[in-house]
Image (cartoon, rainbow, N blue to C red):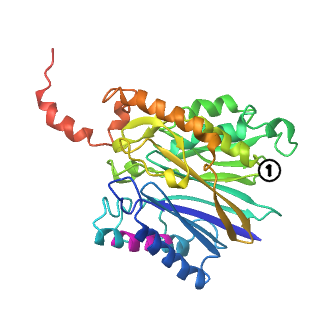
């Protein structure tokens, strides 16, 4: 049975500020998707949140970029936006960059990751959801999952993984993509994905073309032409039986690497794995958070979720992240805490520079 897994997210209103999700918004979303399930438009669904981002996880049989599914997500977000406006929540409808649905939510604000899979005998799926960061945050974890034998011993000892994987890289500034195979093109891959503000991993595949992972790569600032909030991406990863084991897919997050985002989308900070209950960034509107929901996919039914980072073995990682947070914050408005100037072009900095331009003089 071929099943489509669609994960679509949007910031439809923060509670309080950018820190949390009001329960009413999740209630409205569940009601909307429950109606779609009763009408057999979707097979199953799950509604979660990470920080102030609402996450719609849906299974169906209609394939990727299906107009009905995307309209369902859009209509759900619009209903949630209305509820957020009634509650006077902050930034209500922030990610909704269009007035009306135009056939596909891509390019309209929400983030999207989708894959069509042939359900194996057992199909363990991990869905990662982030807040206060950009899609480039997945570059390092995906590389470690699918190309680094020090992280994933299956690349060495599992015959089903020994040939490696193919990585699809998106140049988000030019709108171009390229596929590179590992291990044979590993160094070429690293040249690109080591610059995660521009080159972002969109998907990972086996050498014979089976999808292994899909990520959202939509960038709000490039859609709107200005800063309207960070992208807060999502990622789907298949695990076990020819793919990384669950523990291999989670292991990259034991290192809280620096990602862009945080306060006003303008700062670098540690990517911190937390439980569902801890996904409420408040210190300097951060630091960036990631949660992971684990599911067993059974004939299109989402058995779960399991809160995968609700594990004390990540306490050391979280402690290290808090130390990094303290260190980075001491830089104040200076780089490398603040993003480099080219990234600041999408924030409110151009308005400040416009005011100062006439006062610059030539020596």
| Disc 1 target residue | 208
What kind of secondary structure does the magenta stretch mostly adopt? Answer: helix
Query: In the figure, is residue 224 to the left or right of 316?
Result: left
From the top left corner, tell me how far across and down residue 151 is, in percent: 72, 35
Check disc 1: other Cα within 10 Å, few if <14, some if 14-19, many if 20+. Answer: few
Query: In the figure, is residue 357 to the left or right of 100?
Result: left
Q: In the orientation shown, which residue stands out farthest toward the top?
A: 363
Q: In the orientation shown, which residue stands out farthest toward the bottom?
A: 39
Q: Quadrant of the C terminus?
A: top left
From the top left corner, tell me how far across and down residue 207 is, in percent: 78, 46
Residue drawn at the location 38% of the way across and 59% of the way down: 95
Q: In the orientation shown, which residue stands out farthest toward the right?
A: 159
From the top left corner, tell me how far across and down residue 341 is, in percent: 34, 31
Extent of the magenta region: 73-82
Query: In the figure, is residue 239 to the left or right of 9?
Result: right
Q: Camera-side residue: 308 or 210?
A: 308
Q: Is residue 77 magenta?
A: yes
Q: Camera-side residue: 360 or 76?
A: 76
Residue drawn at the location 71% of the way across and 41% of the way down: 146
């Amino acid at each position: 049975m071929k099943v489509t897994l669609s994960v679509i997210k949007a910031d439809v209103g923060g509670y309080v500020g950018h820190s949390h999700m009001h329960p009413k918004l999740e209630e409205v979303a569940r009601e909307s998707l429950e109606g779609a399930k009763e009408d057999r438009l979707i097979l199953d669904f799950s509604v979660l949140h990470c920080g102030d981002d609402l996450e719609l996880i849906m299974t169906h049989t209609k394939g990727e970029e299906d107009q009905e599914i995307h309209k369902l997500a859009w209509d759900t977000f619009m209903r949630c936006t209305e509820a957020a406006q009634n509650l006077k929540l902050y930034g209500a409808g922030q990610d909704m960059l269009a007035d009306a649905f135009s056939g596909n939510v891509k390019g309209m604000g929400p983030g999207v990751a989708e894959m069509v899979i042939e359900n194996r005998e057992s199909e363990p799926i991990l869905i990662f959801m982030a807040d206060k960061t950009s899609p480039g945050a997945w570059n390092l974890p995906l590389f470690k999952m699918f190309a680094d034998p020090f992280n994933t011993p299956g690349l060495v000892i599992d015959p089903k993984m020994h040939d490696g994987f193919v990585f699809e890289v998106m140049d988000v500034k030019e709108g171009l993509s390229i596929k590179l195979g590992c291990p044979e093109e590993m160094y070429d891959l690293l040249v690109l994905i080591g610059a995660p503000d521009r080159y972002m991993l969109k998907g990972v595949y086996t050498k014979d073309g089976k999808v292994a992972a899909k990520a959202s790569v939509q960038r709000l600032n490039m859609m709107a032409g200005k800063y309207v909030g960070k992208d807060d991406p999502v990622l789907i990863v298949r695990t076990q039986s020819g793919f990384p084991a669950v523990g291999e897919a989670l292991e990259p997050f034991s290192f809280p690497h620096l990602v862009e985002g945080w306060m006003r989308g303008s700062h670098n900070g540690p990517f911190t794995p937390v439980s569902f209950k801890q996904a409420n960034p408040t210190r300097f509107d951060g630091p960036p958070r990631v949660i992971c929901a684990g599911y067993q996919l059974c004939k299109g039914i989402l058995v779960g979720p399991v809160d995968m980072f609700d594990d004390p073995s990540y306490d050391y990682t979280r402690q290290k992240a808090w130390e990094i947070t303290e260190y980075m914050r001491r830089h104040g408005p200076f780089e490398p805490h603040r993003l480099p100037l080219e990234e600041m072009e999408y924030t409110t900095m151009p308005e400040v520079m416009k005011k100062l331009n006439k006062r610059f003089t030539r020596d």
